[in-house]
Amino acid sequence: MIELNSISKVYRTKTVETLALDNINLKVDKGEFLSVMGPSGCGKSTLLNIIGLLDEPTRGDVVIDAQGISNYKTRALARFRNQKLGFIFQSFHLINDLSVLDNVELPLIYRPLGAAKRREMAEEALESVGLKNRMKHLPSQLSGGQKQRVAIARAIVGRPEIILADEPTGNLDSVMGGEVMDILLKLNAEDATTIVMVTHDKRIAGKTHRLIRLFDGSQVN
Amino acid sequence: MIRHLLTLIWNRKQRNLLLLLELIAAFLILFGVFGFVLYNLDKYRTPLGFETENVWQASLFMTDEPDSLTRAAVKKQLLINLRQVPEIAAVCFGNPVTPFSGSTWTSTSDDNGYEISAELVAGDEDYAQTFGLNVLEGRWFTEEDQNAKYSSLVINKRMRDTYWKDTSVIGKVIQWNGDARIIGVVEHFKYQGEFSDENNLIFSYFPDHSSEMPTLIMRLKPGYDPSVEVQISNIIRQTTKDWKFTIKNLENQRIQNSRQYWVPIVAFLSICGFLVFNVALGLFGVLVYNIKKRRAEIGLRKAIGAHPSVILSQFIWEILILTTISVIVGLFFAIQFPLMDVFDVDPGVYARAILFSALVIYSLVLICTIYPSRQAAMVLPANALHEE
């Protein structure tokens, strides 16, 4: 499903050159739930950004769903992200001025869909995370766990094949983190959604199919 | 997308309020200034209707002594003497209601049940030629009008169009200080200045020697020698002897008269330009600030599939929608002026003022929005999503 071939990423400033990822080779199968662990600054988020086509590698190729992404232009990349990928962030990144329903609908407004269909899909996604009763609320009226469930609904509303989660439980207590993890596991189990999750939590990582560790930009096991 | 943007704008109404108020205020100020400028320019565009170049005007203060016959003889002699000066193309007498003097004489009359109101100017048979008036219909006064059955009147086109549009007025007898016959129509005579309204106007005839006509008007030939001005002054002094007189150049008077309108117009436009510049700066600052504050949102939108052009158009549309709301609110207030007829101004002036104000506001907003929106479109999602 996801194939990273000899991926390196170097950040350059006028005076400093930082190697964020060094020759990463990784294969994630369809329906696999992979967690990525490592100390802060080891390149986890950079790896996730590269898989999520939010950043370009300095060297190497990214192949997703058997499609080489390297030659994609901006418009094709945007369309690809919209249709194939779902994102979950540690700090939720909900738009506070939009209702829960409007937040969940957001990825769909970049698709040629009618308003009724978008609303139907967003309600369905909210129902699957148990928040249909909160769809008129604003994010500020929700708890951290509820916010992350809204973010999950937003990630799955477009029915993507891959979900990229950057420390989805990082800002939550253990109970709420557990709830969020249960939803992700359920998604993976029932819909065969491929999930790549960055986490600091060994216990959470232990629930996934496979764990890789990064250290100073290199894969260590 | 528009529905999504409307939701976003509505939910941010408190934060957008100041921007809305700024745009409404800018629209209304522009409307006021454009209204003032267009109102005056419309009047300015109407031809003056008479010549001022090389035209000189001498106001004669005739003494009571000797008797009126002697005064008439002096005036006739004065005309004879002046007509001998080769540089003088035409000369005539008029009453004290002269161009740019600020004097007006308004009268009304009951013409068989219809009230006729008009301003009055009096001139002799050479008045039209001296001023270069354009007689559209009929003729100007001649000496024969002294003994005509009815007193003769020449009216302006505006008066004809006001009271007798689409009918022939030449030969028409009206009640104006008794029976009077209209013998001619002149196109324009905006004697109060280029920026004045052209009102209904009646020229009445007085012979040149009449004591009602103390203003001597002379049109000199183009390129005349300036020394002729001294010569004219000497002729007047020598012919009239103890009469006092003042001579003014009509072109200078026209310029002075116009200046009192141009100065406020230029001042208003300058203030307005400064205001527009400040609004532009404010708007630009607010938009740059908003985009900085919304970097995470922009990053998210790009991550979930928004192309940079979509981000660009989103921010442009957002501000265009806000501008449209401001213009609609401003329009509500602006439209009260023609509806309630607050000033005696043609509704077309208001319509154009609204149109120009809206055009300036939209142009300003677009210019100020393009750069910040481009900045927004170039936000890198990987960076923006990690800043928060």
Image (cartoon, coloured by chain):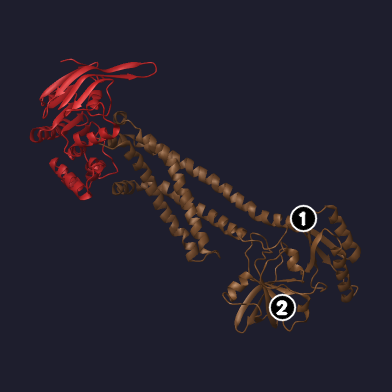
State the separation of the CA atoms marked 1 and 2. 32 Å
Quarter of the image for residue A110 reads top left
**What secondary structure is marked by label 2?**
strand
Near-viewer residue (A62 or A31): A62
- The answer, for residue B96, to whether it is visible in the render is no
Please, which chain is the residue tagged with disc 1 on?
B
Near-viewer residue (B9 or A169): B9
> Tag 1: residue type?
Pro
Q: Position of residue A55 (x, y in %)?
A: 28, 26
- The answer, for residue B376, to whether it is visible in the render is yes
Which residue is at 13% across, 41% downward? A128
Q: Position of residue B23 (x, y in %)?
A: 45, 49
Which residue is at 8% across, 35% downward? A190
Instruction: Please determine whether, in this image, residue B260 is positioned above or below residue A80.
Output: below
Residue assigned mark 1 = B222
Label disc, if present, on residue B152 of the rendered structure: 2
Instruction: Please determine whether, in this image, residue B173 is positioned above or below residue A208.
Output: below
Q: Position of residue A62 (x, y in %)?
A: 21, 24
Position of B7 with respect to B364 (left or right) is left
Near-viewer residue (B122 or B303): B122
Which residue is at 17% across, 26% downward? A2
**What secondary structure is marked by label 1?**
loop
Instruction: Please determine whether, in this image, residue B54 is positioned above or below residue A59.
Output: below
Q: Position of residue A130 (x, y in %)?
A: 14, 42
- Whether pointer 1 and pointer 2 mark residues with C-beta atoms closer than 8 Å, the reply is no
Label disc, if present, on residue B360 of the rendered structure: none
> Tag 2: residue type?
Ser
Quadrant where the C terminus of chain B sits is: top left
The red-tinted chain is A
Q: Earlier in the sequence, mark 1 or mark 2?
A: 2
Please, which chain is the residue tagged with disc 2 on?
B
The brown-tinted chain is B
